[in-house]
Image (cartoon, rainbow, N blue to C red):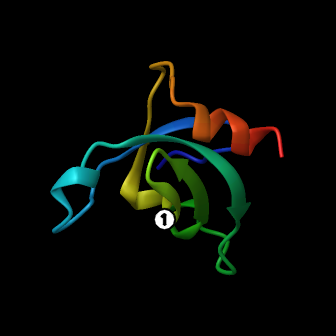
Amino acid sequence: MDSFEIGDRVRWVHAVFQREKQDAEGIIVAVHPAECGMPRFDVYDIVFRFGVISLYGTQIKATSKPIHYPSVLKHLHE
């Protein structure tokens, strides 16, 4: 299981029942480590073009594609 850091680009791979959000790409802006110490249960705040969503590490995958929407880039500089 991957562990992610602030600034990593990721893809939401398990957006159940939300077709418009499946495979959405975003940037991690905060990391909340799991109390049990297992990275798969870490929670990540991710900025997507439709807003900030908190997801478990099991719901995202790393991506190296550039992200070009201004709302994400603006949020990173706040």
Residue drawn at x 20%, y 66% is 16
Circle 1 SS class:
strand
31 w.r.t. 17: above or below = above
Position of 75 with respect to 65 (left or right) is right
Residue 7's x, y, as percent?
A: 69, 37
Position of 44 with respect to 74 (left or right) is left
Residue drawn at x 40%, y 59% is 58
Residue 61's x, y, as percent?
A: 41, 42
Residue 48's x, y, as percent?
A: 49, 47
Task: Please name the amino acid that badge 1 sits on.
Answer: Leu
Residue drawn at x 48%, y 65% is 56
**Residue 76 visible in the shown view:** yes
Residue drawn at x 41%, y 50% is 60
Which is more toward the observer, 63 or 76? 76
Which is more toward the observer, 70 or 20? 70
Which is more toward the observer, 52 or 8? 52
* Residue tagged 1: 55
| Residue at the outermost bottom position | 35
Residue 72's x, y, as percent?
A: 60, 39
70 w.r.t. 46: above or below = above
26 w.r.t. 63: above or below = below
**Residue 8 visible in the shown view:** no
